[in-house]
Image (cartoon, grey):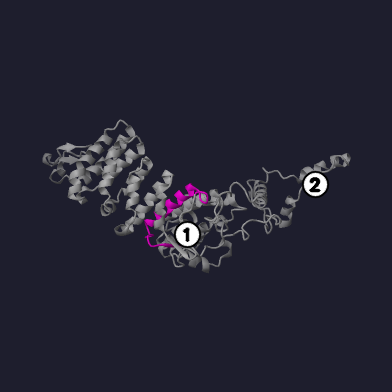
Amino acid sequence: MVNVRDADDGLNRTRLIGSLNTLKAIWPLLSEPECAVTQENIKIVICSVLCCLYSGFSEVVVPCIELLERIMTNPLPWLRDFVPLMFDATSSSPPFRCKSLSSGRPSRSASPVSGINTLPPSSLGSLCDVTVTADEINDFNVPLQLPDHSIEPAISESSSPLVEEEIIDPLMHADLYEEVTKCDRYGSDQTSPQMVGCSDDSVGVVKHLPLDVCDFSANCFVYTAAILGKRFLLAGLKGLKNDRDVRISHKILALNCITMISKHEDLSRATLLFGDFQQTFSEVSRFVLHDDDQLCASTVAFLFSIDRHKFENTDNVHNYHRVMRTFQPIRKRSVLQASIGQQHILDALGLLPDALCLATSEVSSTFFLLKVTCGEFLSSLRWSLINECIREKWQEQCLIAYFNLLFSDDQKVAHAASTGLEQLVRNADFTEYSGVFAARIPDNLLSLDMNSLPAVSLS
């Protein structure tokens, strides 16, 4: 936790990445009630991770977003009342504050290790505590003065052992070698390949949470979604972040995290601040037109999560229609996958017949995952809640389509369909014929009356 609290993507980037990945792995343990970690420390970690989102290095940004998604998957009960900006403003724990590069980039003249009092432990040096002053570390930055063989060959031969003593073995001093040389390169080469193509928002790990993201009183859910949206998705008057400023993979991760947040908080009214201009998350819908199929799929999942809270007044119907009519199977699958368990939204938006048509027609697709998703969607439909006209037209076609999946030549598709068969029968609602079918044979036939057994078993 210390490396995340004192985050620095210039000097301690390797440790920061390792700490973020470790926190992601052990977060289920940290979120347990009997965990010894205090609520105060968890709040500091969350604020520090939000600060790390402004790093210009992808290897730092990716674990940050993944950790936030892990936190929001099963959020702690007090997160809804946690206001990050207020906590960040009132926190007075200097060791827990994030460091930042005050000038944006280290200057070439400044020593990259000024102010360091101890030598970071390496794989060998961690066995004992070694204290080194800043002056001693700075001695390593002095260029080696090799003797001039043309002038005094005799002296050079006698001094060569001394020169060898000044050479630092990078294997024996891995941490010192890595951090000093990388920081020097970071300060002298401002056009490093890792930094090329980064947007203006990639200023490095910030010291405090930015105030110009959303309302000051926003809770942790809203503020986290807002900072992800402003950092990776929305660009104010420019509309959306283009692919030159933000990587597509970062946009997908940010959308997935915001989708997870929207399951716990209504983000339909959240407002992002861009100076005098404001944006809402509804403008993210334009990513359905993006060339990348995965980004489009993540956008569809996000729009469905937003429409859960305001499907009566949504403007996304045409976006769903547009995705359903595309030729890309990944995009079609995204609509069906987002529709599973959201039957009431489809019905309210008038999209249920279109979704049924898509599911029944794509069972003959050559894309394995699309056929599996068709089966999952069809088995999740509760026909007793569907309008009578739609039911008369589509129920038989849906059952036939599902049986085609069940007897598919592809064993993976058939196995997936057989897994959802019990749910299909339970949701089919065959009215007076409901007792004719059974999903499985009872374990104990001797204790049952023969008249109570179903005539047909689908096991």
**Residue at image point 65% right, 46% down:** 174
10 Å crowding of disc 1: few (<14), some (14-19), many (20+): few
In the visual, does 238 lie left or right of 297? right
Please state which amino acid type lies under the numbered disc 2: Gln
Compared to residue 289, the image places residue 83 above or below, namely: below
Please state which amino acid type lies under the numbered disc 1: Leu
10 Å crowding of disc 2: few (<14), some (14-19), many (20+): few
Quarter the N terminus occupies: bottom right
Asked whether residue 383 appears in the rendered view, the answer is yes
Query: What's drawn in magenta, residue-wise?
Result: 243-272
According to the picture, the residue beneath numbered tag 2 turns out to be 145
Label 1 vs label 2, nearer the camera: 1
Q: Give the quarter of the image for residue 413.
A: top left
Q: CA distance from mark 1 to mark 2?
A: 56 Å
Image coords of residue 142 (percent x, y): 75, 51
Query: Which residue, as the protein is rendered here, is positioned at the far left?
Result: 451
Secondary structure type for disc 1: helix
Quarter the C terminus occupies: top left
According to the picture, the residue beneath numbered tag 1 turns out to be 237
Image coords of residue 380 (percent x, y): 27, 46
**Residue at image point 39% right, 49% down:** 288
- Marks counted in the figure total 2
Image coords of residue 252 (percent x, y): 45, 49
Secondary structure type for disc 2: loop
In the visual, does 70 lie left or right of 415? right
In the visual, does 1 lie left or right of 225? right
Q: Give the quarter of the image for residue 311.
A: bottom left
- Magenta-span inclusion, residue 387: no
- Magenta-span inclusion, residue 256: yes
